[in-house]
Image (tube, rainbow, N blue to C red):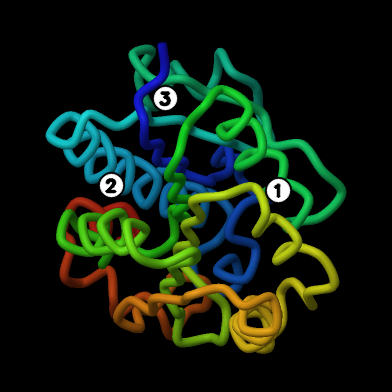
Amino acid sequence: MPQQNRVIVFSRYPEPGVTKTRMIPVLGPERAAKLQHALTAHMLRTATDFCAEHQCDLEVRFYGGDETRMADLFGRERKYVMQRGMDLGARLENAIQNAFDVAVTRVLVIGSDCPDIDANILDEAMNSLSHHDVVLGPAIDGGYYLIGLRSPGELSLFSEIDWGSDRVLRQTIAKATKAGCRIHLLPTLSDVDLPEDLVVCRRYPEIFGEVQED
């Protein structure tokens, strides 16, 4: 039987030339892929420790590669599921709907590109769903690094959003407010998407070491 709560990590298979493409001009395709690998491994350690202490299910939703290659890189003890949907909104909706379909009652989805997500952030997010309908982790670039729901009734938040733009958070909050949702906002953090974001990685030697010259 599934646990009452679920944490879903969204990530990509770290294939050179395909992942972290905006980092390639400064890192090259191999080191950009190594960065993707290091960020994902870091986030999975954080999520695994949190779920072990809070009796949550953990699921990895990935894009690119396949289940075997993901398990080879990140460990066979985790559940890996291919992301499904034409855009990020459809993929988020599919993952969260699947959780509600098996009677999970609180769902957090986190990206793998924000190494500052820690146990305190996850704890605040999960606890906030006791009294709020939606929890959002604002990213500096105008998107969000975390979204949490406690009802499939909020799945409409993933439609008609300009994914990849600096309007994602603003549009999501507007839709949630219009729907009468109670919203909890987490601290604003930075994703590691652009070369200038690499400064964030300096706080994490296990990540930053992967982007150094051999």
Numbered disc in front, either 2 or 1: 1
Q: Is residue 71 left or right of residue 159?
A: left
Disc 3, SS: helix
Few, some or many C-alpha atoms within 10 Å of disc 1 (few <14, some 14-19, many ≥20)?
many
Residue 52 visible (yes or no): yes
Given residues 144 and 151, the one toward you in this image is 151
Among the two numbered marks 2 and 1 on one chain, the one whose residue lies closer to the N terminus: 2
Among the two numbered marks 1 and 3 on one chain, the one whose residue lies closer to the N terminus: 3
Disc 1, SS: helix
Percent across and percent down for residue 195 are: 48, 79
For residue 105, above or below residue 204: above
Residue 214 visible (yes or no): no
Q: Which residue is mark 1?
A: 93
Amino acid on which the number 1 mark rests in the picture: Glu
Few, some or many C-alpha atoms within 10 Å of disc 3 (few <14, some 14-19, many ≥20)?
few
Tell me the number on the disc at residue 42.
2
Q: Is residue 87 left or right of residue 141?
A: right
Amino acid on which the number 3 mark rests in the picture: Leu
Numbered disc in front, either 1 or 3: 1
The structure residue drawn at horizontal position 59% and vertical position 36%, both measured from the top left corner, is 62
The structure residue drawn at horizontal position 32% and vertical position 57%, both measured from the top left corner, is 130
For residue 150, above or below residue 6: below
The structure residue drawn at horizontal position 62% and vertical position 78%, both measured from the top left corner, is 180
Give how far apart the Cα atoms at labels 2 and 3 are.
Answer: 12 Å
Amino acid on which the number 2 mark rests in the picture: His
Q: Which residue is mark 3?
A: 73
Q: Quadrant of residue 102?
A: top right
Q: Is residue 119 left or right of residue 212?
A: left
Among the two numbered marks 2 and 3 on one chain, the one whose residue lies closer to the N terminus: 2
Numbered disc in front, either 2 or 3: 2
Given residues 17 and 8, the one toward you in this image is 8
Percent across and percent down for residue 108 are: 43, 50
